[in-house]
Image (tube, helix red, strand yellow):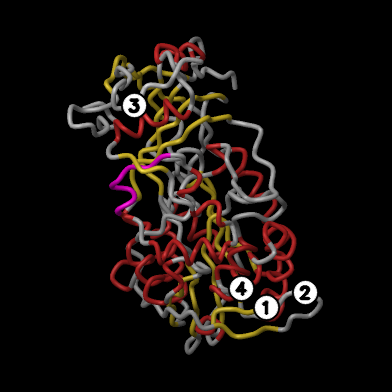
Amino acid sequence: MPSRRSTATATPAAEAAPAEVAFHRVRVHADEPALPDVGATTDDALARCGARFGPGDEVAIAVGSRGLHDLGLVVGRVVAWVREQGATPFLVPAMGSHGGATAAGQQAVLESYSIDAEHVGCPIRATMDVVALPQGECPVPVVTDAVAAGATATIVVNRVKPHTDFHGPYESGLMKMVAIGLGKRVQAEVLHAHGTRGLRDLMPLVARQVLAHGNVVLEIAIVENGRERTMAVEAVPAAAISDAEPALLALAAAHLARLPVDTLDVLLVDRMGKEISGVGMDTNVIGRTMIAGEPEPPSPRIAMIACHDLTPASHGNATGMGLADVVTRRFAAAVDHDVTRTNVVTSGFLLRGKLPVVADDDRQAWQLCLRGAGVVDTAGVRAARIVDTLRCRDLWVTDAVLADLAGDPAVAVLARGLALHQPDGRLTPFDGT
């Protein structure tokens, strides 16, 4: 990216606050397939899956820590299907070290998504205890959730999506959920101790041991489109998981939302959170991985990133905040450093856990990003604003970025000449009101 740094002596920001820059709200339209009836599709997939239970069977339904649009609906249909066969369903958190690596914390994550007895019809049995499974030729120990292991069978409900740390045939999907989700903190630490090799190479070996020697009989795979709407639900028998996942991953990757431009001076992200991405912001969207020894993505190239809020659903877990350059004081106040440290240390990717520069308010965050990007003339600044990395096709852009998008029939300009900040220094609401 060309440098715009002045050769003159820098003036302190407090003495030379840049003038407000006009933004424009645009929307990038895309042909995104979505299921017309997610519940009916789930019912049909379950009816055809071949798994059957009977009276006296206890069935663990393992659910992760991602805030999918239809997760509660799908889990509720699985619960009802198990109960219709006379079996007794219950929920188990399958989220590795998330939720502060405590049973209470992981239960709270599910409850925050309205996945509990009141909403889906069966109780949660949360534990961080694990039991060992045969290791075989796998080079690391293999464990799985102790409560789920005591059930007659386990059904795993999970999203399939490109991972934020690595790429391979198995990423953030079925195999990872079986290995790390059900393996709790113990398995997460074992695999993350090997860095990205542990995820890319060793995680599938652990998953195969769990599938061969545990009681997982079925995984419900959910794929969302670039607008966070469900485009596929498949019931995959345990024996078919390793073969089925690569195609589901390819489908998800083809519909992953991305920024419509490759080069920015500043990206403003209204919020990050664990329900948005495992590291708060999707690295595939922002073009930053920040893992020692791993190459950074070739695009997009963004000089400075500011994140303004941490979502309540994160429960203080700010893993991935180090991907940003600047955060606001209210973001910093929302961080639970114990919970964040547990998740970051378990992952082994400590660079992502660094606290960025803290701005007093949203306006100062913008000013600091301009300085960090070396922007001298704000008239030509290339900047964009998004709500979060799941919603990056609806964005605010400056004149320079709007000029790049001009003439693209997929881009609609929804509003022009928007003020980025209110008089009190806070961001103008995203809808411009």
Most frequent secondary structure within the magenta stretch: helix
> What amino acid is found at the position of numbered circle 4 in the picture?
Gln
Using a 10 Å C-alpha cutoff, classify the residue at mark 1 as few (fewer than 14 neighbours), some (14 to 19) or many (20 or more). many
User: Upstream in the sequence, badge 3 or badge 4?
Assistant: 3
| Amino acid type for the residue under numbered disc 2 | Cys
Pick the front one: 110 or 34: 110
- Residue at x 35% of width, y 61% of height: 315
Q: Which residue is mark 4?
A: 187
Give the mark nearer the N terminus: 3 vs 1: 3
Q: Is residue 331 magenta?
A: yes
Label 1 close to label 4 by CB (< 8 Å): yes
Residue 298: x and y, percent? 66, 33
Name the residue that disc number 3 marks: 13
Q: Are marks 4 and 2 in contact (CB under 8 Å)?
A: no
Q: Is residue 250 left or right of residue 364?
A: right
Looking at the picture, tell me which residue is in the foreground, 138 or 297.
297
Q: Which residue is mark 2?
A: 138
Q: Residue at x 69, y 81 (%)?
A: 213
Residue 46 position in % (x across, y down): 53, 64
Q: Which residue is mark 1?
A: 142
Residue beneath the point at 51% across and 14% down = 404
Q: Residue at x 36, y 43 (%)?
A: 358
Marks 2 & 1, CB-CB < 8 Å contact: yes
Which sits in the foreground, 261 or 361? 361
Amino acid marked by disc 3: Ala
Q: Which residues are magenta?
A: 326-333
